[in-house]
Amino acid sequence: MINYRKMNLKENPQLNVLNHSCAHQLAQAVKHLYPHAKFWVGPVISDGFYYDIDLGDDAIQEADLPKIEKEMKKCAKDAKKIVREEISKADALEMFKDDPYKIDLISNMDENEVVISCYRQGDFTDLCRGPHVENTKFLKHFKLTKVSGAYWKADAKNKMLQRVYGVCFENEEDLNGYLKYMEEAKQRDHRKIGKEMDIFMLSDLVGKGLPMWLPNGYTVWRILNNYITDKEIARGYKHVHTPDLGSVDLYKTSGHWDHYKADMFAPMVKINEGNRDRTLGAILKDIDDSKLEDDVYVLRPMNCPHHMVIYGSRMHSYRDLPLRIAEIANDFRFEAQGAVKGIERARSFTQNDSHIFCTPAQIESEFKGVVDLILDTYRDFGFKDYTFRLSLRDPADTEKYFPDDEMWNSAEASLRNVLDDLGINYFEAIGEAAFYGPKLDVLVQPAVGNEVALSTIQLDFLLPRRFELTYIDENNNKQTPVVIHRAILGSLDRFIAFLLEETMGNLPLWLAPEQFTIIPVNPNVHSDFAYDLCRRMAAEGFRVKVDDRNEKLGYRVREAQVKKVTIQVVIGDNEVQNDLVTIRRHGQKQQLTMSVSDFLAAMHREVAEKLLNPEGEE
């Protein structure tokens, strides 16, 4: 039985070969339907395969995929043997002389170092190193999933090609299971749910990757903000508020300018006669060379430099430590347009961030405190399926990391010791560290899709040095503190996207943007009672409204279900006469009638205890 949640076809030898072979079958079918088609590459990916295709002036739309699938099935039914042929570079150049994309691939091959091979199936031959299945009859159980654009060689300066995606399995049962899984993923997509629930909106006029929170969404955002802030304050964190931008000098000091500027928004420079007609590249060079006289600012991609400056603004004794500085901070990163996805990955987002300044002797206790806070938070949200990843520097590729082997060895050893002492089960990931130090990521497995890194803890010996931070130890000597970077919810935006997809929008009562809709059966008769109850509930802190529109009861109930209002409160004759309410929860058919006082008491308990279901069972 395939675990579709954790499926990676690249790592499954049989399915890898099957999907790569099916990519060739896609190309064969496209060549039949579009004889002028030319092909770049068709690799296997974690959830199937794709092929990049140049169709000239033609374009494949989603509506064209069934037509291509039909032709692929004909190819499979022909049951042609798939034959591997090893050829010389000269023969390869001659064979693919009409396809500039294959010519480009072949031209970069050294036949003294690699074997050049192609695969032939009936009337179609494609350049490939293989391996492939033996016969097209094994390529029956497939589905083309989507089509998009992709620049040749992933370079925006090159031509845009058509990228057709698909997936192939060994039998119909596995394919149908995967398609059912993908349909569930589609229904869980936070962009779909966010639109249905009026959580957020996007506008190209405002800017790609810049989400705007609507009233319902901002309600969830505000509750999460208050939730994690209160939790942190109770644990001794000091919350601050710092600017959304900083000087380039700040990021030069921290090292982010050298290591991270490609992902930052362009610097903001005052336009004057000296630079009015200059290119951005020339201005950037002057910034790098520190030749500009005016201040230069950037939108901040992270908050640690600001917090380093706050710490360094006064002297500290060892008695002041640990100092836990926290902030709910706006950050900005110029994500690639193709990578932007709703509020899951945006160019503007809000981080639940903190930096703990401590002595080396306090690392273990502070690290343990952060882990406890993460686990306590996960219990509130019912997260149970997660793993810990220790992200380390790649010693074979140190260019993107701060060059200090002694610091890295010390930091990584310290983190391993802490994790081992805490008894935390973890796995190591080489090359996933931040540029200034190793980190621990908590990977949560969602209902659909790959694991998501929600929380992170990073150990940092570097930035305190770069900012020349110190404290006076018990012997009256200056020492450099250690910094622990940590984020519990990560970005609030991404966390909300995760929650929407996990719950399909059925958020627990304490977090739901629309907790209650009171629906009078007959608006002309029952509205007075409904509005009295609404005012009372609002005064007690509940998010509640009355739907007394001149629509049928069933219509109003169904609309509340679509909007995922947590609880519908129906008011009829019996309720008015006996001071009762009849309630129905979203997604449930059964109704429950109780006194108003019992109802309010139960709802207050459910919110206060952050219960995850009506009965309050974990």
Image (cartoon, rainbow, N blue to C red):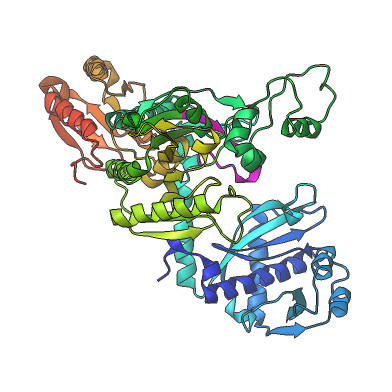
Residue 458 lies, with reference to residue 531, above or below; the image says below
Q: Total of numbered circles in the picture? A: 0
Give the image quarter of residue 571.
top left
User: Where is residue 607 drawn, in percent x and y?
Assistant: 24, 31
In the image, 605: left or right of 401? Answer: left
Q: Residue 397 location, x and y as percent?
A: 61, 58
Please identify the quadrant where the N terminus is shown.
Answer: bottom left
Quarter of image, res 70: bottom right
Q: Is residue 333 magenta?
A: yes
Pick the front one: 326 or 105: 326
Could you tell me which residue is drawn at 15 percent across and 33 percent down?
A: 593
Name the residue: 42% across, 50% down.
440
User: Which one is in front, 317 or 571?
Assistant: 317
Question: Can the viewer see residue 548 in this picture?
Answer: yes
- The image shows residue 147 at horizontal and vertical percentages of 65, 54
- Residue 137 position, x and y percent, is 61, 81
Q: Would residue 556 be seen by someone viewing this image from the given angle?
A: no
> Which of the two residues, 475 or 123, is positioned nearer the viewer here?
475
Membership of 142 in magenta stretch: no
Stretch of the chain drawn in magenta: 329-344
Determine whether, in the image, residue 248 is placed left or right of residue 118: left
Residue occupying image coordinates x 82% and y 52%: 57
